[in-house]
Image: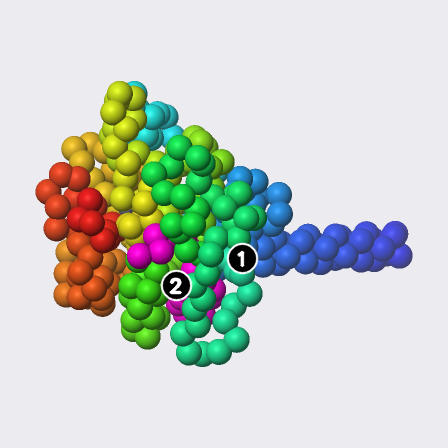
Amino acid sequence: MPHRSWQLTLRWTLLWLLAGALLVAGGTVVQRIRAGQHAPASAARTQPGPAGKLATPATPGPVAPWVLGAAPLPRRPDGFGVARSTPPALMNRRLSTVDLLPPPTSTSFQSTIGPVPPQVLARSTWKPICPVKPEQLRYLTMSFRGFDARAHTGEMLVNADAAQTVVGVFKRLFAAGFPIEEMRITTEAELKLPPTGDGNNTNAFVCRQTRGQTGSNQTQWSAHAYGLAVDLNPFNNPSVKGNLVLPELASSYLDRDWVRSGMVVDGGVAVTAFESAGWKWGGRWSAPVDFMHFSANGH
Ligand SMILES: [Zn+2]
């Protein structure tokens, strides 16, 4: 019957319109993820640290988004993860920064230097066995420029003797627009997480032994355990010793001839700023070669 046929046509039309609307909505979600927006809450990582950041693909095209901290790596006997080739989504890493502290209110560099507040100490890696007392550390807040080109406020624990120097260096980095992904206090909990090899936190004080010394009878504290070393954009500037690459997924960034945003290079602002302050750069070492690492004491 013509009337019934017309009704059927109408129903099919409505059905197709609905399906089309759902596809458009789904496409919007995919576009948001590819554009490096925050993941939906269900996809956010639940461990400490900025939640649910996703990678912007290095090249346009169907590159799967990357959810940080989601995929534990198999462990080596020494506890580090097995190095894996860098996922395409992280080969030219430019993740947006999640603000943990309120962003600066001024376009110029802002910083504070103060004693370590008890609640900051409590969420840090400090414990009584560490080689410095809390009074020997300072809590810094500093403006930094994200890969998203916006200004953010970072936090850092450093040795009191190094506080002015570190602030001076990061002031120069900010003025130069050198991008930093995140700058926050390392927590004890994240040291104990299974390795995922995709971290990129710029930090200073971490109460830990020199890498590779775990299990040794003699504790050899890292310069980080004194607050006398800074790791800058670790993923963009990995350390390598034999087949140990840290972070474990950052091997693409061992190609130092392919200079990408956030990399520390000889003659660049980061090396110049630290070395002019008398600090040493781990990129000049032979084993490990530690491109992220700057230290006041050369260790
Ligand atoms: Zn370091």
**Relative image position of residue 63 (x, y in whole percent):** 40, 49
Query: Which segment did they paint magenta?
Result: 140-161
Please tell me whether mark 2 sits on a helix, a strand or a loop.
loop
Instruction: State how the image is colored.
Output: rainbow
Q: Residue at x 43, y 63 (%)?
A: 113
- Majority secondary structure of the magenta segment? strand
Is the residue marked by circle 2 packed among few (<14), some (14-19), or many (20+) residues within 10 Å? Answer: many
User: Which mark, by number, is residue 147?
Assistant: 2
The image quadrant of residue 245 is top left
**Relative image position of residue 117 (x, y in whole percent):** 53, 53
Find disc 1 in the rendering and name its residue: 100
User: Which mark, by number, is residue 270?
Assistant: none
Please tell me whether mark 1 sits on a helix, a strand or a loop.
loop
**Relative image position of residue 203 (x, y in whole percent):** 37, 51
- Along the line of sight, the residue nearer the viewer: 118 or 105: 118
Q: Residue at x 28, y 36 (%)?
A: 221
Q: Amino acid at mark 1?
A: Leu
Query: Marks 2 and 1, how far apart in space?
Result: 16 Å
